[in-house]
Image (cartoon, rainbow, N blue to C red):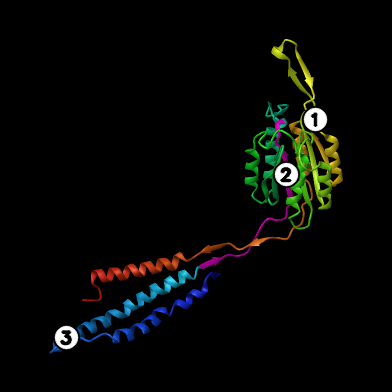
Amino acid sequence: MIDWVWPFAFTLIPLPVLLRSFWKPLQRQQAALAVPDITNFQIEETSRGSMLASAMPWRALLLWLVWAALVTALARPQWTGEPVTLPTTGRDLMLAVDISGSMGTEDLQLGGQVVNRLTVVKSVVSDFIEARQGDRLGLILFGTNAYLQAPLTFDLQTVNRLLIEAPVGIAGGKTAIGDAIGLAVKRLRQRPDGDHVLILLTDGANNVGEVAPIKAAELAKQDEIRIYAIGVGADEMRLQSAFGLLGSRIINPSAELDEKTLKAIAEKTGGRYFRAQNTEKLVEIYDIIDALEPIEQDAETYRPTAALFHWPMTIAWLAFLWLILCDWRGWGHD
């Protein structure tokens, strides 16, 4: 169907008639030219008058067509399509990803090569995001500070790109788990009532920030937000001694991972804690989370619109150009 954005513009249609009615009295007040003999003038004027009479009908129609087309364009016609239902049957998922300095530890493998933790997380979470068609996803990156990179949105491509472009340590070298949870709670509580989920991934312990992780988990519980916590990092890592003279030694690169707190956060909010010692385990964890029941939301619809003002504008220009061409060629005057 066709709608009009400014339908009141059509009240301008009779404007030329009103201007003409006011213009005639002004013309009558002008002084007349007196001549001794007007016979020749009468003949010439009669001939010219009959010529104009034959020319005026189509010229007047063209002028009215130009004016009507311009007023129609001013009224802003637009085509409105049938309602389109948006895919809103999914969940509201907020992803909180640790990008502190320790995420640069190279203790995981991807494609047969040893890479740092954040590279593996980006690869696995990226696939997880792409599979969430129809869900709202948000992204929080945290280190010393927590930042909202993407609010809850259907634009999964942008969320994915923001995650992939995040470098290690850009948010600071420490780990503010409590602040990340608090920021997620703040954003999720703005959504309508329903099941809200936070997926928290970290490789360390809370050692900075204004909000304690357990306190933040209590706030999440009050807003009925479930937290799924993931601890990432290998249990063993072989380090070569200086110059390789003393052989190698095995260390635990995840010694600082605070599993106790992460478990408490998950249990307090009705979620679960997962431990990812390698890439395969991390993929399995996100597959489990992917099996969560979707929340029910009211369907959102929109009606696509397309502007049509350029059509009457084109008609006005064509009619005006035709009028100018006729005057230039002398059509209707000979």
Could you say which disc has been placed on residue 80 in the image?
Answer: none
* Residue on which disc 2 sits: 95
Between tags 1 and 2, which lies in front? Answer: 1
Under tag 3, what secondary structure?
helix
Left or right, 302 with respect to 37, comes to: right
Identify residue for label 1.
Answer: 256
- Kindly check if marks 1 and 3 are in contact, taking CB atoms under 8 A apart as contact: no
Residue beneath label 3, please? 41
- Taking 283 as reference, is 196 above or below it? below
> How far apart are the two marked residues, 1 and 2, measured between alpha carbons?
22 Å
What is the quadrant of the N terminus in the image?
A: bottom right
Which residue is found at the position 48% from the left and 78% from the top?
11
Q: Who comes first in sequence, dot 2 or dot 3?
A: 3
Local secondary structure at mark 2? strand
Q: Residues within 10 Å of mark 1 (few under 14, many from 20)?
A: few
Question: Does residue 117 appear anywhere in the picture?
Answer: no
* Amino acid type of the residue tagged 1 in the rendering: Glu
Write down the region rendered in magenta.
Answer: 77-101
| SS at badge 1 | loop
CA separation, marks 1 and 3?
A: 110 Å
Q: Is residue 327 left or right of residue 320?
A: left
Quarter location, residue 42:
bottom left
- For this view, does 302 lie left or right of residue 197? left
Say if 125 sits above or below 4 in the image. above
Q: Quadrant of the C terminus?
A: bottom left
